[in-house]
Structure formats: C-alpha cells, structure tokens
Image (cartoon, helix red, strand yellow):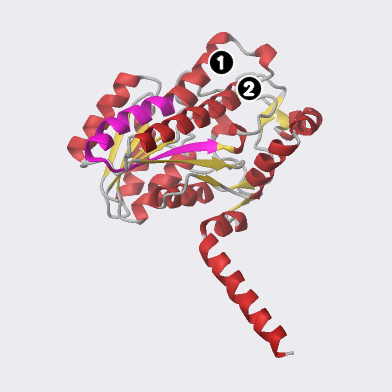
Amino acid sequence: MHTVVITGASAGVGRATALEFARMGANVALLARDADALAAAAEDVRKLGVRALPIPVDVSDAKAMDRAAEQVENELGPIDVWVNNAMLTVFSPFSKLTPEEFARVTEVTYLGQVYGTMAALRHMRRRDRGTIVQVGSALAYRAIPLQSAYCGAKHGVRGFTDSLRSELMHDRSRVHVTMVQMPALNTPQFDWAMSHVAYAPQPVPPIFQPEVAARAIVWAALHRRRELYVGMPSIKAIVANKFFPGLLDRYLARTNYRAQQRKPLAPATRVNNLWRPVPGLHGTHGSFDGCAQDTSAALWASTHRAAIAGAGLAAGALLWALLKKR
C-alpha cells in the first residue's frame, strides 16, 4: 500500500481516515471542495512523515474526478486504494424537500461514489490490482425518517457495488471492492447539514468517534472482506431489518424524529454545506465528544474472527478432554 485516495477528506471520517493511512506509511491524496480545509488536512498528514496531495474537487463532477485521478497517478504514483467517502444529507421530511435538494444529495452521496469508482477503475484495471472502499451506512439497509435522500443514495451505492463486484468476478479481475457500513458518528455533518426540522440535528445514539470508522476503513482496504459492519448498532439494524422490516417501520416512526433532533432550536441563520463548503468547521470531530465512544467491541470481533474461532475451538477441545477424563 503506497498511494491512497480519499474523497470527503477535509473533515470527519475522511480526515480521520487520511491520518490513519498516513500512520501506516501511505502517501495520501485528499479530495474535497474546500481548498483551505484540504490544505490544513494535508499538513496534518505530512506531519506523519508521508506525502500529501490536496485536490479541490466536487465529486459530483465526473470529468473533474477523472482529472483528479490522473493528477494522483502523475504526482504520487499508482493508486493502490481509493476510498469513496464524500457525502451530503438534508434533515427533512420528504414533503419539505425540494427537487434540487434531493438531486444534490444524490449527486454527491450516490453519483460521487459512482464517479470515484469509475475514475479509480480506469487505472486499477490496467494493472489488475487495487482496492476500492465504499463508505456506506447501516442506513444502506435500514432507512430512517428525515433522511430520505441520504438513505436512498446509500441504498443505491450498495446496489451498484453488488453489481460491479459480480462483473469484476466475471472478468476474473483482481481489483477488490468492499463496502463498510457505518453507525452513527461524531462528525461535523450535524453542525452544517441543511435542515428543515425544528431542532438542531444529531446522530442517533449510540455514537462513535470518526477514528473508529477510520480504523474499519483501513482494515477493509487491507483485507479481502466483501463487507464490514461497524459497531453493534449497525449489526442490529441490518439484521433486524432482514426479519422485521414492518415492525421497524412503526418503531422508527415513533422514535426517530425525536432521536435525530436536539435542543436548542436550530437558528434561522444556520449555515449549511449543501451548495458550498462551510469555512471554519472542518475538524475531524463534531459536537458530541462528550457522549461518543472511541472503541467498538463488535468491530474488534468482526476483524478478529479467525482468532475468536480458533480460541473457541481450543476451548472446546480442552473442555472435551476434561470431560473424557471424568
């Protein structure tokens, strides 16, 4: 692993992931809209002793994504890992969304991953190697109210990724595509996402720090796992939706309007990042450090399945031997 590209790299999960890859010695290309925020993130990456290449780009522009991929190849070298992480959302009942708002979320959160994948594959296919990581969400399986555009986009990413994966298998390609399904995360999106609800948005607890997501993305990039669920809340939501979707519809209708909002009232002058970046808020963490978890036992278990299975077999063998002695 020498060169990694990360979209949405100026803040939140993308910025945490850039730092995590840098700690492992990878050179990192950082893609996002805000040039100043990218420059600051790139400087943090360089402090870890690797090269950083900030590229201001809107992921909804397919031609710009192709140019960014070419620039990375020319300046950092062959792309080994491409992480599609950029996203937008609007907190709103569907009835209050405009067509333009819905389209913008779809263009960035869904088509941004499509265009990033296309740009990466143009280079990876030639070499017949590389890994593409799609940053997903438990909401790619179980949609919730007030985020119809985002949930639809994440469902779309999962569908297109499954189709692409089968095509790569048909072609006997060694390019690997994986998807990482995230839980609620303490990122700045809740401070700058457009909102048509009465109160300020918040992630549905329990909440995890972006570094948990970053570790999951790096692990997925280095292991040929088809999909990785991050955190017990993601596992519960995905499994429950498989067996009890109607029950979840009713449960979420009762609980998730309140669960996604917090006091105080969202001010009428609140800025949002739907159409342009919001300067000054591009940190790794959002406003929920006081209640966010920085570890996940479920993620550890998922990424250590072989060790756990081996320990279970050893314990079983020991128990059997003890019973036989009786």
Instruction: Give the residue at x 58% y 75%.
Output: 314
Q: Residues within 10 Å of mark 1 (few under 14, many from 20)?
A: some
Q: Can residue 236 be seen in this view?
A: yes
Residue 283 percent coordinates (x, y): 48, 40
Q: In this view, does 194 lie above or below 44?
A: above
Q: Nearer the viewer, residue 173 or 266?
A: 173
Looking at this rendering, what residue extends furthest in the front direction? 324
Image marks 1 and 2: residues in contact by CB distance under 8 Å = yes
Instruction: Give the residue at x 50% y 17%.
Output: 104
Quarter location, residue 140: top right
Amino acid tagged 1: Phe
Q: What element carries label 2?
A: helix
Q: Give the range drawn in magenta.
A: 112-136
Residue 150 highlighted magenta (yes or no): no
Q: Residues within 10 Å of mark 2 (few under 14, many from 20)?
A: many
Amino acid tagged 2: Ser
Q: Name the residue under label 1.
A: 102
Of mark 1 and mark 2, the one earlier in the sequence is 1
**38 on left or right of 326:** left
Q: Main secondary structure of the magenta part?
A: helix
Instruction: Give the residue at x 30% y 36%.
Output: 54
Residue 126 highlighted magenta (yes or no): yes
Q: Mark 2 points at which residue?
A: 148
Q: Which of 208 and 3 is in front in this view?
A: 3
